[in-house]
Image (cartoon, rainbow, N blue to C red):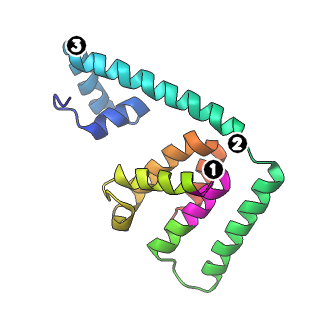
């Protein structure tokens, strides 16, 4: 399903992240294209289900406040030690830091998978190809995923950890 709408635009439309002009263009197309309207309805329903299931799952795997504090304290002690040495962290170190933060909230396997998906859906296309130029789009995708998996707190910690 293309009709002049890229997969990225569909995704951003579902997330409410389009500019006003992009939103108006897609909405105008949806008014005249039954197949796109039906596709949009299916995707919107699926998106709502994912958020609902993510919310339920997040609550069932909630960490105790003490475990969360301890885990974050350890992660940030490592980050602080790196920065205290006066060395500017490499992108790989930043990726490792993001993974460590996500692991505290949702486990190692989920953290790795979320980072891979975020990279695949960003201009980088893979974690191995994340560069300073593709960092921001990758980080924004990861934060969006983290909001579903880890909640607002987890997403906020990722945002803070991911600043270059």
Per the image, label 1 sits on a secondary structure element best described as helix
Eye-nearest disc, 1 or 3: 1
Query: Residue lying furthest right in this view?
Result: 66
The residue where tag 3 is placed is: 34
Residues at marks 2 and 3, CA–CA distance in whole angstroms? 40 Å
Find out whether the residues at labels 2 and 3 contact each other: C-beta distance under 8 Å: no
Q: Is residue 101 magenta?
A: yes
Q: As displayed, is residue 27 above or below residue 102?
A: above
Quarter occupied by residue 40: top left
For the residue carrying disc 1, how many other residues have a C-alpha within 10 Å: few (<14), some (14-19), or many (20+)?
Answer: some
Per the image, label 2 sits on a secondary structure element best described as loop
Q: As displayed, is residue 125 above or below residue 90?
A: above
Q: Position of residue 122 (x, y in %)?
A: 35, 52
Q: Position of residue 12 (x, y in %)?
A: 36, 36
Residues at marks 1 and 3, CA–CA distance in whole angstroms? 39 Å
Q: Which secondary structure class fits the magenta region best?
A: helix
**In the rendering, which numbered label is found on residue 61?**
2
* Mark before the other along the chain sequence, 2 or 3: 3
Instruction: Residue at 40% x, 36% y: name it.
Output: 17
User: Observer-nearest residue: 57 or 28?
Assistant: 57
Find out whether the residues at labels 1 and 3 contact each other: C-beta distance under 8 Å: no
Find out whether the residues at labels 2 and 1 contact each other: C-beta distance under 8 Å: yes
Per the image, label 3 sits on a secondary structure element best described as helix
In the image: residue 30, left or right of residue 70: left
* Mark before the other along the chain sequence, 1 or 3: 3
Residue 19 visible? The answer is: no
Quadrant containing the N terminus is top left
Query: Residue lying furthest left in this view?
Result: 3
Instruction: Residue at 67% x, 80% y: name it.
Output: 81
Looking at the rendering, the stretch of residues picked out in magenta corresponds to: 97-108
**In the rendering, which numbered label is found on residue 106?**
1
In the image: residue 58, left or right of residue 52: right
């Amino acid at each position: 399903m293309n009709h002049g709408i890229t997969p990225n635009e569909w995704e951003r439309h579902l997330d409410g992240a389009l500019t006003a002009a992009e939103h108006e263009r897609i909405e105008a197309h949806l008014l005249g294209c039954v197949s796109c309207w039906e596709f949009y309805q299916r995707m919107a329903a699926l998106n709502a289900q994912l958020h609902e299931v993510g919310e339920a799952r997040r609550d069932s795997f909630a960490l105790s406040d003490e475990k969360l504090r301890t885990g974050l304290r350890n992660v940030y002690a490592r980050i602080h030690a790196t920065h205290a040495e006066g060395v500017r962290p490499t992108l790989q170190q930043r990726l490792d830091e993001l993974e460590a933060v996500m692991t505290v909230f949702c486990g190692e396997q989920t953290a790795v998978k979320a980072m891979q998906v975020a990279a695949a859906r960003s201009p980088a296309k893979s974690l191995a190809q994340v560069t300073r130029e593709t960092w921001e789009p990758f980080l924004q995708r990861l934060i969006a995923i983290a909001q579903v998996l880890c909640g607002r707190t987890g997403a906020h910690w990722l945002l803070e950890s991911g600043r270059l």
